[in-house]
Image (cartoon, rainbow, N blue to C red):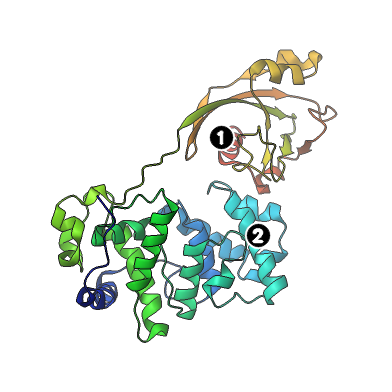
Amino acid sequence: MTSATLMPAAEVAQWPDRLLRWQAVHGRHDLPWQNTHDPYRVWLSEIMLQQTQVTTVRDYYARFLQRFPDVATLAAAPLDDVLALWSGLGYYSRARNLHACAQKVVTLHGGAFPRNAATLQELPGIGRSTAAAIASICFGERVAILDGNVKRVLTRALGFGGDLAQAAQEKSLWKLADELLPRDDLDQSMPRYTQAVMDMGATVCLPRKPGCLMCPVADLCVARREGRPEVYPVKTRKLKRTAQSLWLLWAQTREGAVWLRQRPASGGTEDALKSVWAGLHCLELFDSFELLQAAVPASQREGLRELPVFKHVLTHKDLHLHPVHMVLPASVKVSEQGIWHAAHAWPALGLPAPVRKLLEQQS
């Protein structure tokens, strides 16, 4: 397969109009972040939806808006509060960037989000596609989004066989995406068009068994004519999946306080979890039971109790977690960096999802 040229001019003219008509009748209209031009709400939903299912995001989105109803409230909140509310949603760098971005919007832009994609992209955690989503939906700017769903829709429709692992090919697809955008009445058409291409990828042009019979542009689609839509998009480079075993020292007092250490905002180069759990409060982690045992005072080691091992799945890594429980007096310090958190206090902290699940199941 080679990269396709743009569809004929007559088809280019039909493309946005067909998607707009389809979205008005068959698109999604009941998601809590739809039907708004508030850039704070659109931005929040876009960040939460990165590599996360809509069904998961719904509840987190509602809780976030209840706790942080606007960008100024989010910017003023402690990072720990943001991480605590994000706990379980995963990809915690999104939460740290969310907080940093809110602070930049307040300090650099007076609490108002920039109205164009180029300036939005300068903010922490906002990439080209997210910036385009905010600018097109909220401000009617004629800019294309290109998230995973939209890449699938466009590569299939255009028969674009370029390898998107190559920057030059992705750049070519961006250009084609720009050409297909509406050209008239942008304040009205751009928000609806952006929603339309997202809805198409989420509900019709699925990775497997696409609903071609329901597609408003099926007769224009190269992949459908070829009879092999599943081969698009092409992306050859794949990250190798790895596994890691970690031992978690779950130290607790008789009163229910838990020993936790806040992980650094960015770990050393040897720390495989630096971008996953950075900034979160965590049980003490060790690479082996022997290292964990050595960290405990000799007089207390008989109290160590190994619990069942469980697996926590990350995007490109399986974590095999070995919890080890013990009860200690509150006068004992497990390490120089951690502290005891009372039973009523630790649930409000930002905790890695598997740690929170472990503590909640046993509390």
Q: Quadrant of residue 25?
A: bottom left
Kind of residue indicated by mark 1? Gln
Closer-to-camera residue (166/11): 166
Residue 354 seen anywhere in this rendered image of the structure: yes
Closer-to-camera residue (241/237): 237
Kind of residue indicated by mark 2? His
Which residue ends up furthest to the right in the rendered image? 331
x and y percent of residue 128 in the render?
A: 50, 63
Q: Answer above or below: position of 269 versus 63.
A: above
Callout 1 environment at 10 Å: few (<14), some (14 to 19), or many (20+)? few
Name the residue rendered at 67%, 60% in the picture: 100
Closer-to-camera residue (3/266): 3
Q: Quadrant of residue 305?
A: top right
Asked if residue 215 lies left or right of residue 259, the reply is left
Q: Answer above or below: position of 113 versus 243.
A: below
Residue 147 seen anywhere in this rendered image of the structure: no
x and y percent of residue 147 in the render?
A: 41, 59
Earlier in the chain: of badge 1 and badge 2, it is 2
Name the residue rendered at 62%, 60% in the picture: 124
x and y percent of residue 160 in the render?
A: 28, 57
How far apart in space, not on screen, are marks 1 and 2 (Cα)? 29 Å
Verify CB contact (< 8 Å) between mark 1 and mark 2: no
Callout 2 environment at 10 Å: few (<14), some (14 to 19), or many (20+)? many
The tag on residue 99 is 2
x and y percent of residue 62 in the render?
A: 52, 62
The tag on residue 361 is 1
Q: Quadrant of residue 203?
A: bottom left
Name the residue rendered at 42%, 55% in the picture: 168
Q: Answer above or below: position of 330 versus 296.
A: below
Closer-to-camera residue (271/56): 271
Secondary structure of the residue carrying tag 2 is helix
